Image (cartoon, grey):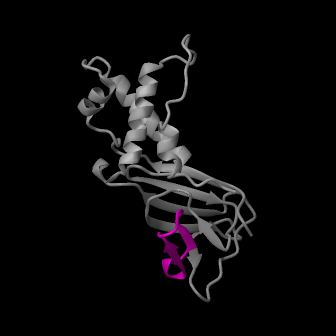
């Protein structure tokens, strides 16, 4: 059975942002004052959260839970890069949370989206008839900003520049997309379902 409902819950957010060198960011933005540093920090956080959501990436180390209504033949985790599956849990027929033995499943980190599958001869256990009967806890993201693909960093800078230059929802000036801008940078890192 294929899981139509996948709910992701952030357990531990990143402890740092992917752009920590605000002097380099301010040079990119042509800003020569410290007066907007807190505003820029907020924009970096917002740009990171947006990029992570639309590209299904974890830029900095963080922990998530994936809640599924039931087991499927293969569990696809639509977040990357994945570093570890901490646990695969499920609510049994008595509605008690159980944890699967890690030796009963394997994790594929080489696919575009990481996957969890059963080892040969294993069966998924029977779950309670409830929403979120399966809970997969996993961690991922890069340890430090220097490890992040430069495409993501440039996309973040473009997004922060846009937020900094356009602080209102509506502008009196005509706004056009920048050719080869943000969307072009991240397009190769997105998987569009067909």
Does the stretch in magenta take in 180?
A: no
- Residue 97 appearing in the image: no
Question: How many badges with numbers are in the image?
Answer: 0
Left or right of 174? Residue 155 is left
Does the stretch in magenta take in 104?
A: yes
Write down the region rendered in magenta. 100-116
Left or right of 151? Residue 188 is right
Q: In percent of the image, x 50 and y 72: which residue is there?
A: 108
Image vertical order of residue 53 relative to residue 35, above or below: below
Left or right of 3? Residue 184 is left
Q: In percent of the image, x 40 and y 55: which residue is there?
A: 141
In the image, farthest residue toward the front:
179
Nearest the eye: 107 or 29:
29
Q: Where is residue 104 in the image (x, y as percent from the top left)?
A: 54, 81
Image vertical order of residue 171 relative to residue 137, above or below: above
Image vertical order of residue 33 relative to residue 80, above or below: above
Q: Position of residue 91 (x, y in %)?
A: 65, 66
Nearest the eye: 176 or 113:
176
Location of the C terminus (image quadrant): bottom right
In the image, farthest residue toward the bottom:
121
Image vertical order of residue 22 relative to residue 142, above or below: above
Left or right of 144? Residue 179 is right
Q: In which quarter of the image is residue 3?
A: bottom right
Q: Where is residue 127 in the image (x, y as percent from the top left)?
A: 70, 70
Location of the N terminus (image quadrant): bottom right
- Residue 24 appearing in the image: yes
Nearest the eye: 51 or 75:
51
Q: Quadrant of residue 37?
A: top left
């Amino acid at each position: 059975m294929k899981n139509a409902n996948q709910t992701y819950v952030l357990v531990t957010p990143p402890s740092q942002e992917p752009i920590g060198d605000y002097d380099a960011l301010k040079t990119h933005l042509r800003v020569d004052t410290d007066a907007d540093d807190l505003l820029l920090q907020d924009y970096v956080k917002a740009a990171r959260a947006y990029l992570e959501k639309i590209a299904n990436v974890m830029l900095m180390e963080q922990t998530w839970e994936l809640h599924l209504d039931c087991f499927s033949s293969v569990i696809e985790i639509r977040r990357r890069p994945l570093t570890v599956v901490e646990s695969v849990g499920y609510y049994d027929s008595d509605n008690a949370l159980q944890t699967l033995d890690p030796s009963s499943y394997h994790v594929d980190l080489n696919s575009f989206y990481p996957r969890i599958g059963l080892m040969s001869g294993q069966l998924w256990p029977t779950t309670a008839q409830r929403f979120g009967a399966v809970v997969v806890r996993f961690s991922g993201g890069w340890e430090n900003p220097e490890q992040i693909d430069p495409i993501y960093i440039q996309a973040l800078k473009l997004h922060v520049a846009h937020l900094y230059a356009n602080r209102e929802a509506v502008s009196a000036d005509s706004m056009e997309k920048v050719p080869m801008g943000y969307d072009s940078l991240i397009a190769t890192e997105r998987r569009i379902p067909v």
